[in-house]
Structures are given as C-alpha cells and as structure tokens.
Amino acid sequence: MTPFTVLLTVALYVALLFTVAWRAGRRADNAAFFTGGRRIRWYWVALAMIGAPMSGVTFVSVPGSVAADGFTYMQMVAGFTIGQLIVAYVLVPTFYRLKVVSLYEYLDRRFGIRTHRTGAAFFLLSKTVLSALKLYVVCIVLQQLVCTPLGIPFAVNAVLTVLFVWGYTRRGGVRSVVWTDVLQTLCLLAALVSALIAIPRALGTPLTTMLGEVLESPYARLFVFDDPLSVRSFGKMFVAGIFILVAMTGLDQDMMQRNLSCPTARDSQRNILLTALCQAVVIQLLLMLGAMLYLYADKTGLTLPDKGDGVFAAVAVHGGLPLIVGILFVLGLVSSTYSTAGSALTALTTSSIYDFAHDVRRRDEKSLRQLRHRVHALLAVAIAALIFLFEYGAGDSVINLVYRVVGFTYGPILGLFAFGMATRIPIRERWVPAVCLLAPAASALLQEVLLRWTGYAIGFELILYNALFTIIGLLIIQKRNEK
C-alpha cells in the first residue's frame, strides 16, 4: 500500500464516521449525550460492545502475542465470561435501581462525597492516560505509513487525530458512540475475516487444511497446568479474568455507559450476555489469525518485526496479500482506536461533570450543555498534551511504565465497590483517599517481595491483591462505635 492509499482510506473512514455520528447526534440533548436517553435497543448495544473493548492496541497485540504465549489468553477469556455474569446480575440491577448517570454516584450514596470523588479520580487518571496512549499508538502507525513519507510532522498528525475524536463525540455523546462502535465492530470483523480468508488462498491451501495446521502447531497451546508459578497458569489467569472484567468493564464508566443506555436492566443484561459470547469468538479468531500470520511468514520467508505488535501490519500491508486486506487492516486499526478514544472522552466528560460538579442536577439544559462543551474540550486538550509528552519526552521504557502504573488504578475502585456492596460497615471517610493510595503501593511492594524471596511472579491477578489491600484498609478505618 502506498501512503496515498492509506491516507485515502483514513479520510474516507473519517468522513463515514462523521456522517454516522451526525445522524446519531441530531437533536441530541444532554440526556442523549450522557446516557443515550436510555432508548437504544439492546441488540445494537450488544453489536457495539463486541468491538468496544478492543482498541487498536488489542487489534494488533492479540495476534502478535501468539508466538510467545500461544492461545493461553483464552484462559483469561473464560474468566471474562464469569465476570460478565457478575456484571449483568449484580451490578446492572444496582445501577438501574439507583438511576445513576455516573457509576461512582453509588459510592456517594454508600459512603459519602469524599469516597465518591476518590473512586472517580482513579477512573479519570487511568482512562485519560490510557486514552492518550492508545491514540499515540495509532498516531505512530499513521506517521510511519502516511505522514513521514508525505513530510507531515507528528504534531499535525496528533492534533488532527484528537480533533477527529473531539469532533464526532461533541454533540451526540453516548448516542454517537454506540453507533460509531457498531461501525467499528463491522470494520474490525471485516479486517479479521478478510485476513483469515486471504492467507490460505495466498498459500494455495484450503482454509480447513490451514486451520488443521494451526491446531497442530506449537502456537495452539491453550492451557498451562504444569507450572502454577507461571504468570500464564490456568488458575491465575482464570481468576484474574473474572475480576479484571468486573473492574475494567462493570466498574468502568466508559464501558458501562453503553450498557446503561438500554431502556431497562433486563435489556442491558441481554446485551451483556450476547456480548460475552461474541467477544469470546472474536478473540479466539484473533488468536487463530495470529498463528496463521506466523505460519504464513515461515512458508513465504517474510521477515517479521521483532515486536509482535507489528506482525499483523507487516503481513497485511507488506506481506503480498491482496490490497483489500491492507485497506481493511487500516480501517480496523483506525476505527477501533478512534471509537475507543471517542467513548473514553465521552465517559471522562460524564464523570468529570457528574462526579465533581456539585450543582449538576440543578442546572438547566442550556447551562449544562455549555459546561459539557467546556469540559469535553478541556479533556481533549489534556489527551493531546499527553500524546505530545509520550512522543517528545518519553521512551519505550517510560511508556511501558505508564501501562503498569495505570494497571494499579482499577484495584482501589474494585475494592471500594466490593466493600460497599458486601458490607454495611460505616467508615471514617476522610481516610479513604489515603487507603486508596496506599493499596497500590502495598501491591507493588508485595509483587517485588514475592518475586525476590519465593520466585512467585504476580501476573494479571495483581488487581486482586490491590483490591484486597483496599478492603483491609477500609476495615481498619471503620467506625467501631457504630453498628
């Protein structure tokens, strides 16, 4: 693919994205921005949610991880399924009963305003940084494929990317996000299916034969039972998958804002269950594709990048496959990243207003719309500033550190909600911020101590220790003189 082909593909997608967002956002009021007016049909939300958790990073990383990890990621996906049931039948009824707009309003009603804002602050920190990092990844790809060959500086690339995201979510909010997520899901599935079909054809091998080779290859290893200390052992990944899903979907304003746009809790539950099934299938197909990419490279002598994240792009764009595969890959990458960033910007706006503006429910429609526009724009500027920081002030090691640090922030949120829903214990609320700051520090210390003294490597289950330390801290600060 030439730079002009990639640029034309991106431009056509952005035009389609704005068309869909404009149609969805016509006559949208504040309720439509924050909750979709709770009038979006559950099956449309389910289709949107298939691709919603899959950013551009996921789109390229899952296939690229197969060489090192095989299909072991499916162990965590099995845990995701159990987590979806908890979200559907524990969290969803609670949120609908309380009629919350921001999930963290629950913490206010259970504990008080300080806990409410602490939980929201952890969400805002993690989601802002992650959104910027995900947009940074797609900016790098576009810089390599388009901007550098055409002499366009990175700053222009980054500003235009953020402007696109800000522009298509400014009016419609959740209503626009759901429909653009549907578009993203279709693009992602088209890219996936086209590659799965094109690779066997390029090798002159029937698809069924190719799938048989995948299942017989070393890449197809699914379970790890023989090494319980491994970060990829079945027990650790399965249990971690349950709680990661609950924390990063059920307690994440970004993910749940779509689910809460359904008219009723029952509709939301139907959407979640269908989403769980479809996401498991899509992730398995991505892993199958990863194995096929490596087998294709072995048979054709194609040189692959050192990093797994670049494997899908290398084969799709420069691997000798039909042009349509490269075009659909670019569409899948761009659509998944723009959609993820757009929904995150909407969720950040919602959380900032409903969690930190004390008079939000007393504002009239015009005043709330003006506040919404200001906050939305300021958050877009913050994301752009972080992208510049990653490009001009951070190396790869710092970016990896950002991912690890952000991974700690969901643990306190999980701990707060678990403690609030499982107990009726009152707490001395002024100490909650300190507890939520100390819990990740204690988790990091435990991780280092266990690795050094016992060889036990804490992997994805780190979120459990993080939440546990939060719960222990809340027990310590309980009001013992009250029942």
Image: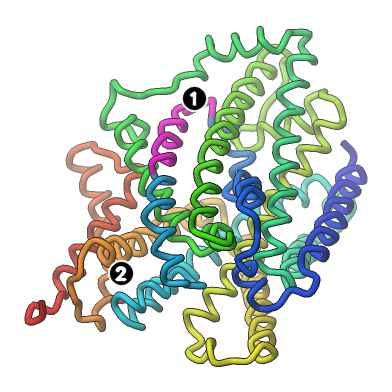
Q: Is residue 193 above or below residue 292?
A: below
Instruction: Report the quarter where the N terminus lies.
Output: top right
Real-space Cα separation, disc 2 to disc 1, in angstroms: 35 Å
Percent position of residue 168, x then y: 77, 66
Instruction: Report the quarter where the C terminus lies.
Output: bottom left
The reply, left or right, for residue 351 in relation to residue 190 is left
Q: Neighbour class for label 1 at 10 Å: few (<14), some, many (≥20)?
A: many
Q: Nearer the viewer, residue 407 or 376?
A: 376
Residue at 57% of width from left, 49% of height from top?
A: 53
Percent position of residue 251, x then y: 43, 60
The residue identified by callout 2 is: 436
Q: Neighbour class for label 2 at 10 Å: few (<14), some, many (≥20)?
A: many
Q: Nearer the viewer, residue 178 or 95?
A: 95
Q: Secondary structure at mark 1?
A: loop
The reply, left or right, for residue 281 in relation to residue 16 is left
The residue identified by callout 1 is: 70
Residue at 59% of width from left, 24% of height from top?
A: 288
Percent position of residue 4, x then y: 92, 46
Magenta range: 66-82
Quadrant position of residue 312:
top right
The number of discs equals 2
Percent position of residue 219, x then y: 52, 19
